[in-house]
Image (cartoon, rainbow, N blue to C red):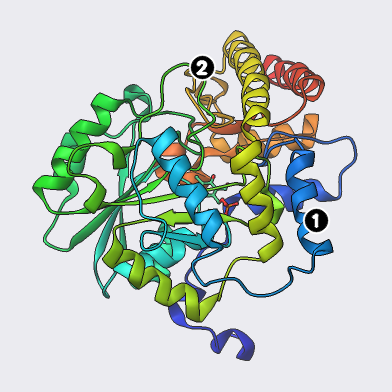
Amino acid sequence: MDLKTSYLAKHVQELRPSGIRKFFDAAAGMKDVISLGVGEPDFVTPWNVREAAISSLEEGHTSYTANAGLAELRQEIAKYMRNYFSASYHPESEITVTVGASEAIDIALRAILDPGDEVIVVEPCFVSYGPLVTLAGGVPVYVQALKENDFKILPAQLEEAVTARTKAIMICSPNNPTGSMLSAAELEALADVVKKHHLLVLSDEIYAELVYDEKYTSIASLKGMHERTILISGFSKDLAMTGWRLGFVCAPEAITAGILKIHQYAIMCAPIMAQYAGLEGLRNGRADVVEMRKSYRRRRNYIVQSLNEMGLVCHNPEGAFYTFPSVESTGLDSEQFAQKLLHEEKVVVVPGNAFGASGEGHVRCSYATSMSQLQEAMRRMHRFVSRL
Ligand code: PLP
């Protein structure tokens, strides 16, 4: 081992780099590439939201804010939680504004985990969950949401994975990478297991507003679940604000107090101009979210049909902006498929195994790309699949 690496903590040395970045790096030097790889909106943040940040700077708002975030932003988040999530959170003691949902996940895990505590991680899942559990001193226990169950975890699977060390379960609905969304009845069934074993749920609901068919249900709104839920969300996806780095975490008072201690020491507060922008987004940005949702829905319908027509079987994702087609019919594994597609047709997709073992045999295609780019990507993929 070289000298420099040897300074790194062992558990950091053992951490695998994200499987998503690898493909972006490979595509970076190529011309005429269409990326269905990125997990971010192709829209620019709505103008009134950008303008609110500009105005805040013009007015000289360049200081720290309260650690938990601007009071008026937390009040607006509490209102949003009531209206859209049917969940009730006190703005002064149960909401923390963070640097993206990413920070929220990290500090929530650090707040609840003792060394060796187990967290059941439902995969395929967002790439950060397992590594962040490990970095918080916990042990990720992966449970596979299977294709035959539309990539939804069953209560029996959860029950089977629970041990005396289990502290929490991490879920994400609508899901990255599969787009699957848990219905109210499915969440109720999971909540029963959670309550029976006195667990916590870390519920990543960042795609809650990007749902296309059914009404959205938050697990925090179910009976007896407020005190067991740490709800994570943010502004990156529905308001197209990835670069602003703004998110939040809602949790019962005692857990929020712990989360806030870590946030205080590690971060202080989220950037003030981003907070003013987020405030405007919650107050006056909802019509834009509706428009963006309509556009994603059209694209989802198009890409799902195209993928199925070319023989890449794909379930209909109820939310987020990802499809997760099977590539098994091509005889290639997910990594080979993504590599070959990139080199032969210059289309970036992400191999499913980047999101956990149960993602193997699939690739993630994001449809947060313009319709014309999507159409060209589908033409190229069709040509590629036909050749195989
Ligand atoms: N959670 C999920 C499921 C995501 O897909 C992402 C980003 O891709 C995040 C969290 C991180 O979001 P943020 O930009 O708010 O940190």
- Quarter of the image with the C terminus in it: top right
Residue 191, image quadrant: top left
Give the residue at mark 1. 55
Do the CB atoms of the residues marked 1 and 2 lie less than 8 Å apart?
no
Relative image position of residue 209 (x, y in whole percent): 52, 32
Residue 270, image quadrant: bottom right
Which of the marked residues, 1 or 2, is nearer the chain's N terminus? 1
Type of the residue with mark 1 = Ser
Relative image position of residue 362 (x, y in whole percent): 51, 31
Q: Is residue 141 left or right of residue 381?
A: left
Q: Is residue 365 left or right of residue 105?
A: right
Type of the residue with mark 2 = Val
As displayed, is residue 21 above or below residue 286?
below
Q: Looking at this view, is 72 or 147 the one in front?
A: 72
Residue 233 visible, this angle: no
Give the residue at mark 2. 313
User: In front: mark 1 or mark 2?
Assistant: 1
